[in-house]
Image (cartoon, rainbow, N blue to C red):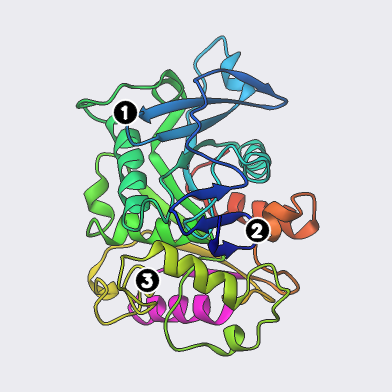
Amino acid sequence: MEEVVNVGGILKVYRDGTIFRVEDPRMFVKASLQGEGDVASKDVVLNEKLGLWVRLYLPSSHLQQQTEKRRLPLIVYFHGGGFCVASPALPDFHNFTLKLAATVGAIVVSVAYRLAPEHRLPAAYDDCISALQWVNSHAGDGGDFKHDPWLESYADFSAVYLMGDSAGGNIAHHVVALRGGVEAWNPIKLKGSILVEPFFGAEQRTLSESECPCDAVLNLELSDACWRLSLPVGSDRDHPFSYPCSPAAPKLEKISLPPLLVAIGGRDMLRDRDHEYCELLKQHGKSVEVVVFGEEEHGFYVVRPQSQSCERLIQEISRFISPVHTF
């Protein structure tokens, strides 16, 4: 079969429409409880027709509690992968999320959203909004959603945080921006968003994009391929989905955003783009804290989860959450 697109060998699109991925997240993982050291995890299918499921993480001590304990902050996490690959079950993301839940002391809901090119944007946004609506239902009357006992028993819905890395950071921005702000998510309280090396783009190259070496973890060829496969057909990188600073994007000054923590890799191709995003938010009076990891490339937190930089990232996340939610 003839290849028409090859994204780093992990995603191949053939002329007959066949698609190959190293890991195919459409394979459902049945709900099950797994022992993972200090953290328990299980998978819950939210919409089998769409292939929408989440992996929940809960510090194990709360499963063995005999008396009522404090509720835990809740992190809704959107994984990276250029909108085209990966899922919560990918070992790199699973191990990172285990570490996140254990260190921060939080429940984590990791969302498996639909991928491009079979499902172009806004499919990923729609799925992540649906997952957040499912979380939100636990704090209200529930609607048509089935409640999960972990969230019902242990989650603090007054301390909910969005988190995403790379494409997931882009998603974390849009699930608020496309819904018109944090008020749209009542009764849960969105206390903050954590964007780790968020994946944004535009037609005009930044300096860090232009100077990015071809052997970098994320380079222009890979980035451009992901945008071509994931944006609506006929769109370029100036589309608001990729460029939130676009004149056609929702006006950032008019959107109520939660406080943001943005982590930027000092050697990441996206660093100039991410700094531009943060500076624009600050100009509009938004609360934005930027943490730079000077020697790190894109995805260091999943590629090297035992590194000092990954340890520092998770500690920064803990610090960002802990002033609001006392541990």
Q: Decide: marks 1, 3 in contact (CB < 8 A)?
A: no
**Mark 3 belongs to which amino acid?**
Lys
Residue sitting at x 35%, y 35%: 135
| Alpha carbon distance from label 2 to label 1 | 40 Å
Left or right: 224, with 90 as reference point: left
Q: Is residue 15 above or below residue 280?
A: above
Secondary element at tag 3: loop
Q: Is residue 207 above or below residue 60?
A: below
**Quarter assignment of residue 215:** bottom right
Residue position for label 2: 9
- Residue 259 visible at all: no
Q: Earlier along the polypeptide chain: callout 2 or callout 1? A: 2
Residue position for label 1: 138
- Residue 230 visible at all: yes
Instruction: Look at the image and give the residue range highlighted in magenta.
Output: 271-291
Is residue 306 one of those drawn in magenta? no
Q: Measured from the top left, where is residue 325 in percent x and y?
A: 49, 43
Residue sitting at x 41%, y 27%: 45
Q: Measured from the top left, where is residue 192 in percent x and y?
A: 43, 54
Q: Quadrant of the C terminus?
A: top right
Tell me the chief SS of the magenta region.
helix
Residue sitting at x 44%, y 50%: 115
| Alpha carbon distance from label 1 to label 3 | 29 Å
Toward the right, the furthest residue is 307
- Crowding at dot 3, Cα within 10 Å, few <14 / some 14-19 / many 20+, comes out as some
Is residue 287 one of those drawn in magenta? yes
**Mark 1 belongs to which amino acid?**
His
Which label belongs to residue 286? 3
Q: Earlier along the polypeptide chain: callout 2 or callout 3? A: 2
Secondary element at tag 2: loop
